[in-house]
Amino acid sequence: MYEAKSKEIVLRRVREALAKSAPFLPPTPDFSSPLHSAPSEELSVEFAQLFIANSGLFLYCESEEDFFDQLYVFKREQNIQNLFVWEPNLQHILYHAGIEINEGEENFVADPESAGLTTCEALIARTGSILVSSANAGGRRLGIYPATHLVVARASQLVPDIKDGLQVLKERHKENFPSMVSLVSGPSRTADIEKTLVLGAHGPKLLVLFLIDDLAQ
């Protein structure tokens, strides 16, 4: 259900992008401009395609309310008994949305029926990756130990390349730059044993991104 909807969204946006008329003659290239630049609509398409290719589950949310609805359904269908959320702002909005979460770190347990929900620093379109850091209140554990890692982000967090994401970090945290910065490109995987790909070997087996479209609002 979710995979089909995600691919449908991506294909629809790709078709819309291709349907836009192009100028008869290409504009003169500006060699002083950044190597990788694109309108936000194209960034979202590029990111979604690569994120799905990396075995991530991409869920497009038309609004914050749509995010609540999709999270509620996902939690129920995946039989997630413990949804761990440690970021105060995220706890606040989920509480008012009526979604049951586990706020206490003392009750943390990593099992197949648990999931961690976090935000992120940025979304990198060029690689389809999620930029995370230790500055997040979820720390490192919520993105590593549970079998399912859920991330909620906004379309306004999309940036073209890794250097742009690092610039976002620099401007946001200034002198308190995080001790850990990492790119998450799909669920944990390894092919060390007989070159057979295994998901979830060193971290989450499922990586899910809820992308809230805040650009059209």
Image: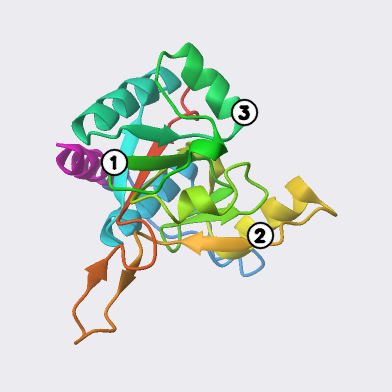
Residue 151 position, x and y percent, is 44, 42
User: For the residues marked 3 and 2, what is the alpha-carbon distance in whole angstroms?
Assistant: 24 Å
Report crowding for label 1: few under 14, some 14 to 19, many 20 or more residues within 10 A (C-alpha): some
Q: Earlier in the sequence, mark 3 or mark 2?
A: 3
Residue 166's tag is 2
Judged from the image, the secondary structure of the residue bearing numbered disc 1 is loop
Query: What's the magenta region?
Result: 1-17
Residue 187 position, x and y percent, is 34, 59
Q: Is residue 129 left or right of residue 35?
A: left
Q: Is residue 106 visible?
A: yes
Q: Is residue 22 visible?
A: no
Q: Earlier in the sequence, mark 3 or mark 1?
A: 3
Please tell me whether the stretch drawn in magenta is mainly helix, strand or loop: helix
Residue 113's tag is 1
| Mark toward the viewer: 3 or 2 | 3
Residue 124 position, x and y percent, is 50, 56
Compared with 27, 60 (above or below) is above
Find the residue positioned furthest to the bottom.
Answer: 194
Compared with 133, 119 (above or below) is above
Compared with 20, 74 (above or below) is above
Residue 72's tag is none
Residue 88's tag is 3
User: For the residues marked 3 and 1, what is the alpha-carbon distance in whole angstroms?
Assistant: 23 Å
